Amino acid sequence: MMSPAWPLFRVTEQAALAAWPQTGCGDKNKIDGLAVTAMRQALNDVAFRG
């Protein structure tokens, strides 16, 4: 059985990778939006039970 931490780590990684190219642009809302969108997409791929 795989630890539930690994898929959540992947979610965090995807959010960071989506936001990284815009880091320093001065628009924190744009960066946040990119991270949230990537996080939501990654969470949709995680299989949860319960």
Image (cartoon, grey):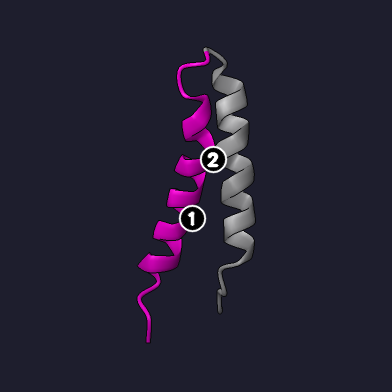
Q: Secondary structure at mark 1?
A: helix
Residue at the extreme top of the image, as rendered: 26
Residue 15 image point, x, y percent: 50, 44
What span is colored magenta in the figure?
A: 1-25
Residue 12 image point, x, y percent: 44, 50
Q: Secondary structure at mark 2?
A: helix
Magenta span has 30? Answer: no
Residue 11 image point, x, y percent: 49, 55
Residue 2 image point, x, y percent: 37, 81
Mark 2 and mark 1 in contact? Answer it, CB < 8 Å.
no
> Distance of mark 2 from mark 1, alpha carbons?
11 Å
Magenta span has 23? Answer: yes
Q: Which residue is mark 2?
A: 18
Observer-side mark, 2 or 1, equals 2
Q: Does residue 4 lie above or below 1 as drawn?
A: above
Q: Which residue is mark 1?
A: 11
Q: Does residue 5 lie above or below 18 as drawn?
A: below
Which residue is nearer to you in this view: 45 or 4?
45
Which residue is nearer to you in this view: 16 or 8?
16
